[in-house]
Structure formats: structure tokens, C-alpha cells
Image (cartoon, grey):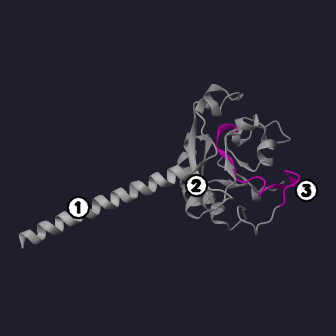
Amino acid sequence: MEIIKSNIMRFNRFVSVILIIIGISIMDSLSQNIIIDSQMTFEEAIKGTKAPKDVILNLVLLDVVYYSVDDKLHRGQLIIHKDVKEDIEEIFRLILQNKFPIMKVVPIVKYKWSDNASMEDNNTSAFNYRNIAGTKRLSNHSFGKAVDINPFFNPVIHKDGSASPKSAKYDTSKPGTFYQSHFIVQEFLKRGWRWGGTFSSYADNHHFDKP
């Protein structure tokens, strides 16, 4: 009887070791197959910003993994406020699990801090020390408490029906787009974020912020 128990224990340990090895192999394989969209240091990601030191001290650089429109795993980066780090991590985990396609996620420094250039390239970004377009008020992006996701797929729709970016088309039947009942929109809302698609002056469909 003792011999049988001993053999069972050895077998269980063997199986555990095999499972660990398989798990490590899978993770290594995934990491090797991930396409890198951004691999900056924090210093590189904030280079040239006009943000004051007290704003910069609250920012963190976050790596995120997602499926892009090529149906392959990609890794990008966001500069965000440390207070929203957990929210963004949880939401991007759901984005990954549900294979919601994101074109790319690259700190906006790549576009010389141009929001328009980033949107035209359908780039997802967060921190950008700038005013709200057409105003002298700082955007929540200035503090890393706002994120724009797939801005070309989810353009701003103005009162007159025009879009920003100008050549973008808003079609919620296509992958990578948002609408009120979308699970990502609802995940942001239940965490206390706002969705720009419900703004009264215009529909900022790619924008989420936490006041």
C-alpha cells in the first residue's frame, strides 16, 4: 500500500513539473511571437512635453498587450496617471481576452505631440499635455487621466455631421468601434470614467476620461 502511495505521489510531482514546463514554454512562445509596437523608456516617452514637474511625477509608463487588426498579438505602451493604472490594466486585460482589435498603442511623442497626427494614424494614446481643442482649458489627457482608443475607427462626430479625422467613417458594425452598450464602454463607466460618445457638444467616440 505504501509503495502504491509513494508511486502516486511521484507521478503527481512528475505531472506538476510537466505542466509547469508546458506553461513556461507557452509563455515563452507567446512572448517571442508578440509584435512590438512601442518599447520606449519613460524618459523617451515624455521627451519634449511641456508638462510641469508636478504632473510628470504622477505619470507611469504602462506596457499593454492586445490583438491588432492583423489578428496577431502586439505590445504597446501608454503614459498614464498612476491613480488610473489599475483601471487601465483591468480594461486592457478584458480587451485582450475578448480579442477587441486595437490598431496600435504608442506614446504620442512619436507624433511630436500632435493629437491630429496620432488620430490620423489610428493610434491609441493617453498622456498629452495640451488644451481641449478649440479652448484654453487643459484636457484630462494633460494629467494622464484620459485615453483615446482607435481614434480613426471612432472619430469625433461634430454637430454638423462632419468627422475628425476628416476622412474617418464611424460604422459601429465594424470591429474596433464603440457604442453605448459596448462592453468596453460599460467597463469604463462602472469604474467612474466618462465616455466621450455621450458629450453634449459633440460625440468624442474614441475618448474616455476620469475626472
Front: mark 3 or 2 = 2
Task: Specify the label residue 13 is tagged with.
Answer: 1
Is 156 included in the stretch rendered in magenta? Answer: yes
**Mark 3: amino acid:** Ser
Q: Indicate left or right for 41 with 121 as reference.
A: left
The residue sitting at 34% across, 61% down in the picture is 19
Look at the numbered disc 3 and give the secondary structure of its residue. loop
Look at the numbered disc 1 and give the secondary structure of its residue. helix
Front: mark 3 or 1 = 1
The residue sitting at 55% across, 52% down in the picture is 33
Front: mark 2 or 1 = 1
Bin the neighbour count of mark 3 within 10 Å (Cα to Cα): few under 14, some 14-19, many 20 and up.
some
Q: Main secondary structure of the magenta part?
A: loop
Question: Where residue 169 appears, x then y in whole percent?
Answer: 84, 60
How many angstroms separate mark 2 from mark 1 (CA)? 35 Å
Q: Indicate left or right for 99 with 15 as reference.
A: right
Task: Specify the label residue 144 is tagged with.
Answer: none
Quarter residue 115 falls in: top right
Look at the numbered disc 2 and give the secondary structure of its residue. helix
The residue sitting at 60% across, 36% down in the picture is 40
N-term-proximal mark, 3 vs 1: 1
Task: Specify the label residue 92 is tagged with.
Answer: 2
Establish if 36 lies above or below 109: below
Bin the neighbour count of mark 1 within 10 Å (Cα to Cα): few under 14, some 14-19, many 20 and up.
few
Task: Specify the label residue 162 is tagged with.
Answer: 3
Question: Where residue 107 appears, x then y in whole percent?
Answer: 67, 40
